[in-house]
Image (cartoon, rainbow, N blue to C red):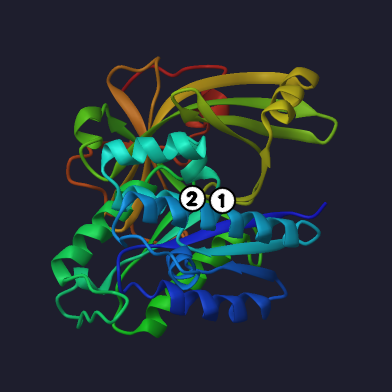
Amino acid sequence: MSRTSKIVLTGGPSGGKTKALNMLKIKLEAYGIKVFTVTEAATGVLNSGFSGEKPSYEFQKAISLYQLEAENRAEELSKNYNAVIICDRGIMDSRVYLDDDDFIKLKNELNMNEVDMRDRYDAVFHLDSTSTDNRVIYENDDVRDETRLEAREINERSLRAWCGNPHYRFIPVCDSFKEKFDFLVKEIKSFLGIPKPLEIERKFLIKYPDTKYLLSLVCSKSEIEQSYMIGEEGKFRLRKRGENGSYIYMKTIKNMISETTREETEIRLSEDEYYNLLKNNLITGTIKKERYCLMYDGTYFEIDVFPFWKKQAYIEVELLDENCEVKFPEFIGIIREVTYDPKYKNSSLSRSIPDED
């Protein structure tokens, strides 16, 4: 069966998205991957003759419609391939440029919600704007006319808009664009499973967090329900994830390589496919939790809060390498690492709950 992943390059002005898009296509095709690209919709709208005011609701609406059409076209072209679609920005970037009322209006006109807009993409890579690093010269041009301060504000709003996507990664400003691009390629190869689809993860037990404070940061909350299944193909996990009644559905198959590393295959499901699998396979356990996705100092943390614990929670972080050092936010109270303790695996918690520390 052919499978296409759709990813977004986003971030503030002067992050290198457009340059990276063109280079990524060449780089990934050298690995034998079929690549389809969706170029920046704003440029397409302007080149097609948009005659309204540039910073306006109508401009953002036109960008969103153009973006959706371009993505649908790429999806149609890619459906017979194992491929990747790379988008220079995505639908959720409209949140960066609209106030709350106009964003609600746009969602209604598009008949979409925030989960639809953010999680229609399998992964999001934020290329940090050069405006955030005073060591680097920030330059605008005929198309990009924001001041350094304005560019920083756009960069921050972009971080907030996309936070909550299941695979969100931060690509920092580096000493050279080559170094930044190499960092991006390493992250994308990890996501695409080149050479293998590995998940390298560490998990820590923490003191129950101040969730209200978390949500004041670059943080998003999701509801998660996951069931552990046995079918004809063996063991797998089903996950329903979203907020306010809007969800995405995933099937995950994991093979353990070490305590921190697993070979992982994820398949996005329709709602009907999800419930059919639930109905027609054996459920060995189910767990519900709230997940707070926190982008902090360039690292994407996932904090899981469970209804059965009042004093403690989890924090998880995915790594590119088992030996990567993890630097936690100073407001997170680490109790101890539980990566290697089988009773703290979610599948174990779905059957038996250990006492709180």
Q: Which residue is mark 1?
A: 122
Q: Position of residue 32 (x, y in %)?
A: 72, 75
> Is residue 99 placed above or below 210 in the rendered structure?
below
Q: Position of residue 130 (x, y in %)?
A: 25, 74
Image disc number at residue 167? 2
Q: Seen from this angle, which residue lies furthest front? A: 51
The kind of secondary structure element at disc 1 is loop
Which corner quadrant holds the C terminus? top left
Q: Position of residue 20 (x, y in %)?
A: 47, 76
Q: Seen from this angle, which residue lies furthest right? A: 232
Q: Amino acid at mark 1?
A: Asp
Bin the neighbour count of mark 1 within 10 Å (Cα to Cα): few under 14, some 14-19, many 20 and up: many
Q: Amino acid at mark 2?
A: His
Q: Earlier in the sequence, mark 2 or mark 1?
A: 1
Residue at image x 27%, y 52%?
A: 157
> Is residue 186 placed above or below 66 in the rendered structure?
below
CB contact under 8 Å: marks 2 and 1? yes
Regarding residue 318, the answer to whether it shows in the image is no
